[in-house]
Amino acid sequence: MNATHTPRMDVMRSQLSRARGLGSAKTGVNHWWMERMSAVALVPLSGWFVLQVMRLAGSSQEDVVEWGGKPANSSMLLALMVLTFYHMQLGLQVIIDDYVHGKPHLPASLLMKGVTFLIGLFAVIAVLKLALAPSRKASA
């Protein structure tokens, strides 16, 4: 008898049986669409923001506060902040799903979502503080 012979085990399962349970979790398509939709929405918002920053370059703090106090500008800034952090969370979730496996997956995912939420909340509060600041030119 050959010493290198390994026992052979035939698995009596069909190809369909082996494939069951390995398919889609039914969330990938929605996640993919949300990433694309948020990216498309961020393009004009980011362009608007860059133009506004260039226009405000060299302005005084009072001028920037007055600009941020206008409802249209503060609304655009809020939309930019919310979409930016939502898009960031979606992208980071894909990275965690692809590279973190086993027990660390859930804590890593929760930590990322918590940190993203907190930073986004700070950004939204900063925009609201700018938008709701009393106008110094009106009181002068």
Image (cartoon, grey):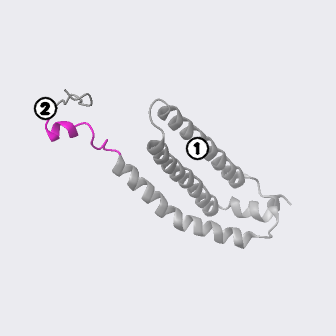
Give the camera-side residue of 73 and 30.
30
The reply, left or right, for residue 112 in relation to residue 7 is right
For the C terminus, the image quarter is bottom right
Query: Is residue 87 rendered magenta in the image?
Result: no
Residue at position x 60%, y 40% in the image: 115
**Between discs 1 and 2, the one toward the N terminus:** 2
Give the distance between the C-alpha atoms of the residues marked 1 and 2, in whole angstroms. 48 Å
Residue bearing the label numbered 1: 116
The residues colored magenta run 12-27
Check contact, mark 1 vs mark 2: CB within 8 A: no
Q: Position of residue 82 (x, y in %)?
A: 56, 52
The disc placed on residue 12 is 2
Mark 1 belongs to which amino acid? Thr
Considering only vertical position in the picture, is 44 above or below 33?
Answer: below
The reply, left or right, for residue 39 in relation to residue 56 is left
Residue at position x 43%, y 59% in the image: 36
**Mark in the foreground, 1 or 2:** 2
Give the camera-side residue of 110 and 82.
110
Considering only vertical position in the picture, is 34 above or below 96?
Answer: below
User: Secondary structure under badge 2?
Assistant: loop
